[in-house]
Image (cartoon, helix red, strand yellow):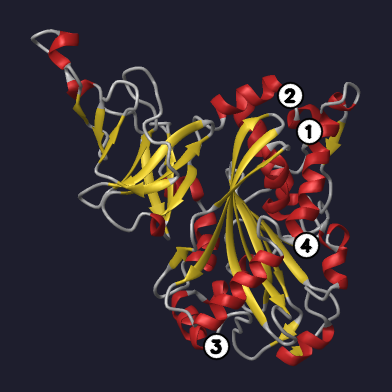
Amino acid sequence: MADASRDVTVPRRVWADEDVHRRELVRIFKTCWQFVAHESEIPEPGDYVTRRIGRDSVIVTRDETGQVRVLLNTCRHRGVPLCRADRGNTSHFRCSYHGWTYANTGELRGVTFQRDVYGKGGIDKSQLGLFQPAQVDSIYGLVFATWDPEAPSLADYLGPMRWYLHTVFGKFDHGLEVVGPPVRTMVRANWKAEGENLSGDGYHTFVTHQSAVELGLFATQHDLAEMAEVTGTRFTGRTVHCGNGHTMRIQRMPLQVKAPAYFGYPKEMWDEFDRNLSEAQREAQSCLSVGHGSVFPNMSFLENFKTNVDKKGDHARYIRITLRYPMGPAMTEQLWFLLQPRHADADWLRLSRLAYLRTNGPAGMFEVDDTENFVGITEAAAGTVAADLPVVLEGGLHHPPTPEEAGWPGDVADGDRTEKTIRAFHGRWQELMA
C-alpha cells in the first residue's frame, strides 16, 4: 500500500474553528463507521447502554431475540430523549413527555390517548419507529455503526486494521469483557488532538512522560535482563497506515527470545495466544512494550506493559479503549474502557487494573501529562495569528518500508519516532472534508 499521506500540511484553525467543527459533524461523523459499545456490556436480552455517534445520543441494546441494535435516542413525536440512564435493562422505552412507548427493537408500540388525539382511525405506528443507523456490525465483540447506507461493509472499512485488531482483541480463548461501566470525562480540547497522539505518536513519549521514566514505570535494563537476553539499548518500533485513516504503532522491547514471549500476561495464557495468532501476529505481540492505534475517526485502543506495578518485579499488561465525542471545537466528551480477559487469574487481573489506573487510566500519570498538551493545542489554535499558521508533518519520511515478507499488512515502516500515522489521520480527514 502506497503512502498516500506523505505531504500533509494542516492549518492550526482546524483544532478550534466553529465552521470546521460543524462540517466535521456532517462529513465525518454522519458517514464513517464508529465504535459504540462492547458486546460484553449488554450480555442479556434487554440490556442497554447509552452512547453517541458524533453529537447524536443513541441507545445500544440487545433485543429479546438477542440481536444487537442501535437506536437514535429521541422520540419520534416531539424529540425528547427516551433514555436518560447510562445503562440498564428494559424491553421498552417510554417517553417522559407524552408517554409514547417503543420496544427495544425500535418499534412504536404504544401511543397514549390515541383516539382522543388522533381520531377514530388513530395513527399509523408502523411508520413511526425509532431511527436506526443504516448499518450495525461487530468484530471481536466491538460494535460499530454508521448512518450511511452507501458506506462499505465494516470489514472493508477496516481493511488491514482487522489484522491488528485481532492481535489485541482476538487472541483470547474466552474473549474480553469491559470492567465496570466506562468512565466519562469532559476535556477542553478538540477531539482530534488525542486521536493524533494515539494514532501512533512515539515521538513525544520520553519528553512528555519523563517523570514516569524517573519513577521506574518503564522497563529498565535490569528489568529487561530478568525477562530475557537484552540485545540492544533502545526500543525498536513499527508504524502502520491501514487505509481510511486507521493506524497502528507497535513498540517492541529489545529482547532476544527463542519462542514468542508475551510478557505481562500469565504464562498459562501464552499457549492460547500461540493458537489464536498467525506467525506474523505472534511476532507483533512477542516482547511487546506498547501497541496502540486508532480506528478513524474517534476510537483509539492501547495495550501497554508496565513493570514494578505493586512491588518490585511485578509486571502486567492492560488493554484500554478510548472514545471521543466532538461536543464543540474546544470540548470533547471522552469514554474510557478497561477490558480484561475472561477467566484470567484474579491476582493478575488486580495487577493489570492497578497498572492501568496509575498510568493510562483517566486520572493516570500519562493521561494528566498528555491532556495538558491537548488543551494547549486547542487554546493556541484559537489565536488570531496562530489560526492561519501551518502545522507541517514531516517526521519519519525517511523511515524505510518494512519488507513485504514480514507478513504485516498495510503500509508498514520501520521507525518509531515519526509523524507517519498523524499524516495518515489528517490525510483521511482532508479527503472527507474537501
Give x and y (percent) for residue 84: 43, 36
In this rendering, the answer to whether 417 lies above or below 255 is above
Residue at x 38% of width, y 36% of height: 83
The residue that mark 2 highlights is 17
- Count of numbered tags: 4
Give x and y (percent) for residue 405: 61, 70
Query: Looking at numbered disc 3 in the image, what kind of residue is underneath it?
Result: Lys
The residue that mark 3 highlights is 267
Label 4 neighbour load within 10 Å: few <14, some 14-19, many 20+: many
Q: Nearer the viewer, residue 188 or 28?
A: 188
Residue at x 81% of width, y 54% of height: 396
Q: CA distance from mark 4 to mark 3?
A: 28 Å
The residue that mark 4 highlights is 416
Query: Looking at numbered disc 4 in the image, what kind of residue is underneath it?
Result: Asp
Q: Secondary structure at mark 1?
A: strand
Label 1 neighbour load within 10 Å: few <14, some 14-19, many 20+: some
Q: Which mark is residue 10?
A: 1
Contact between labelled residues 3 and 4, with CB atoms less than 8 Å apart = no
In this rendering, the answer to whether 378 lies above or below 185 is above
Q: Secondary structure at mark 3?
A: helix
